[in-house]
Every structure is written in structure tokens, then in C-alpha cells.
Image (cartoon, rainbow, N blue to C red):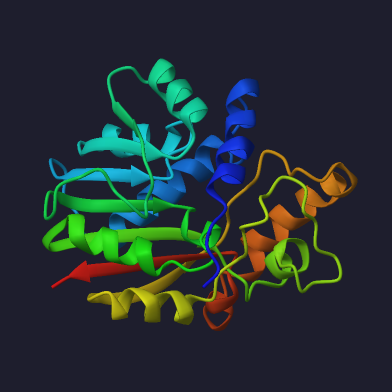
Amino acid sequence: MVTQDKQREIAFFDSYAESQEYNVFTDKSNLKIVNSCLEFSGLQPGMRVVDCGCGSGIFTKLVDNQGFLASGLDLSQGLIELAGRTYPEIEFIVGDVENLPFDSESLDGVLLSGIIHHLPDPSKCASEVFRVLKPNGVFVAFDPNRLNPFMWLYRDRTSPFYSSEGVTENERPIIASEIAQVFTQAGFKVTSSYLSGLHYRYIASSSLRWALPIYNFLDNAVFRLPFLKPYSAFVLTRGMKE
């Protein structure tokens, strides 16, 4: 079984904490992601929700703003310290999604913020999320879609145009059906949805930055068509613990 190289993950994201720049989407797109995840989840304000893979806390703060009891968790000590300085009113915890520091059946919701595609085998994550959720608790995950032509070309290692700039060696865009199967096996009732029309502030590869406005336009225009939805740039995965 292939496992995540956690030390490389930590070193990679700690380096972003030093520059205080880990915020790849525009403010409008960050809000669209969080609103889409919360709407898809069916969770209600006042519920306890942990944002796993919270990074510098941007999504956690947006969840908190909507009236949830939000906390953030991340492997990176540096990013957690940055989040704590930026949003001192919110609890941020250093922790591993494969060994969550929460009591069993203690959470109403879990947001997996772009974290599943960092896990070569997400089964441990699925089991831990199932453990910490209350009965009828819900998780929602947000990840890049391998079926999207742009994501495959730029971020999948099988692509001849793959770029390793700005990502760790653990990362790979996901296939919605494969992730659904893993979380179903963990005990969840799983549904998938898709999200496009998200605009990036920047991309890591300097040689391709000229193409970013073109990508942002095409992603917003093309994948609104219903029959192209499964090829959108991002997958939302929802699971309920029955």
C-alpha cells in the first residue's frame, strides 16, 4: 500500500507559511467553494464542524462566518500558527486526518478541504472521519477532478505536460467514483457533485501564467453545460454516517 510522505507534506506547506501566500483562489471563489460545500452538506448553523486541511484558515473563517462552531486542523505547524495569528477567535489544531485528535461521535460535520487528493490511499482518512462523526453526521470533500482535461494535462503524472511546480509528490487529481467507493466501504452513504467557475489568483508554473485568464474563462463558460458537469475542474464528495 502506498502511503503519504507526511514529512514532505509538512515541509512543503511550512514553506508557504513563511511567505504567507497560500491562498490560490480569489476571494469570490473561496466563498463559492465554502458555500457550495455547506449547501451540499445540509449541515445547519450551530453545528460543530472541523475543517481538515485548513491551511492558513481561509475556509475555516468562512465556515465560522456562517454561524457554525468551526475549528481548523492541518499537518503544517507553520500554517496553523499563521491561521491562529490571522483568526485568533477560532481554534486551530495541528493534526493528521489519518489519526484525528477528536473523540468518537463528537462532530456534526467534517470539511475535507482539498485533502483527499494528497492521500495515495484515502481509506484511513475515511475510517477516521467515520469514527469522529455523530450518527447522521456529514463530511464534504473538495478535490481536483482527474477527468477535467485541464487538471489532467497540468497536474496528473501520466500527462506529457505534467508540472510538478507548486505541488507535492503525493498529489494526484481524483476520480469521483473511486473516492465514492472508498468512503462507501467505510460505512458512508456517498453522493458526488461537481464545481467549476473558480478563478485562480496565480499558478505555480511561471511559464504557464499567461494562460491563466484563458483557463479561467473556459472553466467558467464550458462546464456550465449539464452533460459536461462530470468533467468540471473539481469534485465535491458528500458522505452521511447513517
Residue 192: x, y in percent? 39, 74
- Is 97 above or below relative to 85? below
Q: Is residue 70 visible?
A: yes
Which one is in front, 64 or 165?
165
Q: Name the foreground residue: 131 vs 137.
A: 131
In the figure, 211 relative to 2: above or below?
A: above
Residue drawn where x is 23% and y is 64% of the image: 130
Given residues 10 and 84, the one toward you in this image is: 10
Horizontal side of residue 160 vs 143, given as left or right: right
Q: What residue do we see at 33% from left, 17% from top?
A: 88
Q: Position of residue 26 (x, y in %)?
A: 58, 38
Which quadrant does the C terminus fall into? bottom left
Rendered location of residue 234, percent (x, y): 54, 63
Left of 30 or right of it: where is 221? right
Residue 115 relative to residue 93: left or right: right
Residue lying farthest to the right in this orientation = 207
Q: Residue at x 21, y 69 (%)?
A: 240
Q: Looking at the image, is 228 positioned above or below residue 119?
A: below
* Residue that extends furthest to the front in the rendered view of this protein: 1
Q: Position of residue 31 (x, y in %)?
A: 44, 42
Asked whether the viewer can see residue 23, the reply is: no
Determine the residue positioned at 58% across, 31% down: 14
Q: How many marks?
A: 0
Q: Say left or right for 111 vs 26.
A: left
